[in-house]
Image: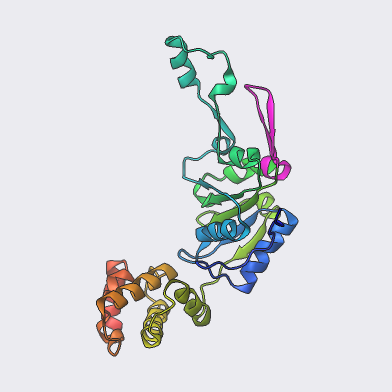
Amino acid sequence: MSEQKTTFNSTSQYVASKELLASVNVAVALQKPLLIKGEPGTGKTMLAQAVAESLGKKLVIWNIKSTTKAQEGLYVYDTIQRLYDGQFGEEGVDDIARYIKLGKLGEAFDSEEQVVLLIDEIDKADLEFPNDLLWELDQMEFYIHETKRTVKAKHRPIVIITSNAEKELPDAFLRRCIFHYIDFPNAELMEEIVKTHYPDVEEKLLKDAMEVFYWIRSIKDIRKKPSTSELIDWINALQIGGIPTDRLKEELPFIGVVVKKDEDLETLKHVQ
């Protein structure tokens, strides 16, 4: 049997900084949730996918919405289905366990193998949501009242939590996490990231596109700064279109791939 891999490294599709690699591996070693913040487009959600791929583990994703309650991540009791089955004489209606559906957190705890659990955009939920998860994330277990069963994690999942900083998270929750802020990639790291997607990209095209990209990001009045994924898409568009790069900054071809707000397009017109 091959030895289980326990150290996260960059993958063929995800290039992480040394600092981010260190934060992930410390969180895995200490068995603590890793809280990731960073501006949109810095790869927060993709990090969990990369960790799962690198360590050879299943990824369980819990997408948080403004209406999400912590209980939903543990389990739900489908009383409507039970009532429906009872009306139509279905067998086994007295077996409440049939109507207990594990949520994403419950699924991660109940897995026969260790999984990577992504709690994505935790700050979208109400202020009590993180506090409502403290016991479960600490003890790695929860109690199902309807069946009097305790679900205890067979293997402590690797928990990655993302936040866009829409709301401040409670101090008690933060104390239990390893924290990492993903800085926007510098030019050297960005070049490495682009080349993971387009290893044969023409050097001049890459250099000129990146120069314009970082120039746009540096403009003070740009409201939505373009992200890494938008640079990658733009380079692809430039390659497909066969656009000469000599006047890239003056002509800004396919700029709608990079700049997504009317007011930002107006700003570019005035600063060119």
Does residue 154 sit above or below 227 in this rendering?
above
Q: Tell me if residue 250 can be seen.
A: yes
The percent position of residue 208, horizontal first and vertical second, equals 37, 86
Along the viewing direction, whichever of 211 and 245 lies nearer the viewer: 245
Instruction: State the residue at coordinates (45%, 75%).
Output: 194
Which stretch did the figure color magenta? 136-154
Residue 233 place in picture, x, y as percent: 36, 70
Nearer the observer, 179 or 150: 150
- The reply to whether residue 128 is visible in this rendering is no
Q: Report the side of 18 relative to 79 (left or right).
A: right
Rendering coords of residue 29 (x, y %): 74, 58
Q: Where is residue 212 in the image (x, y as percent from the top left)?
A: 37, 82
Does the magenta-highlighted stretch encompass residue 185? no
Q: Residue 187 or 54: which is nearer the viewer?
A: 54
Q: In this view, does 36 lie above or below 94?
A: below
Which quadrant of the structure image shows residue 147? top right
| Residue in view at x 56 percent, y 58 percent | 53
Residue displayed at 37% across by 79% down? 216
| x 39%, y 79%: residue | 213
Position of residue 111 in the picture relative to residue 165 (left or right): right
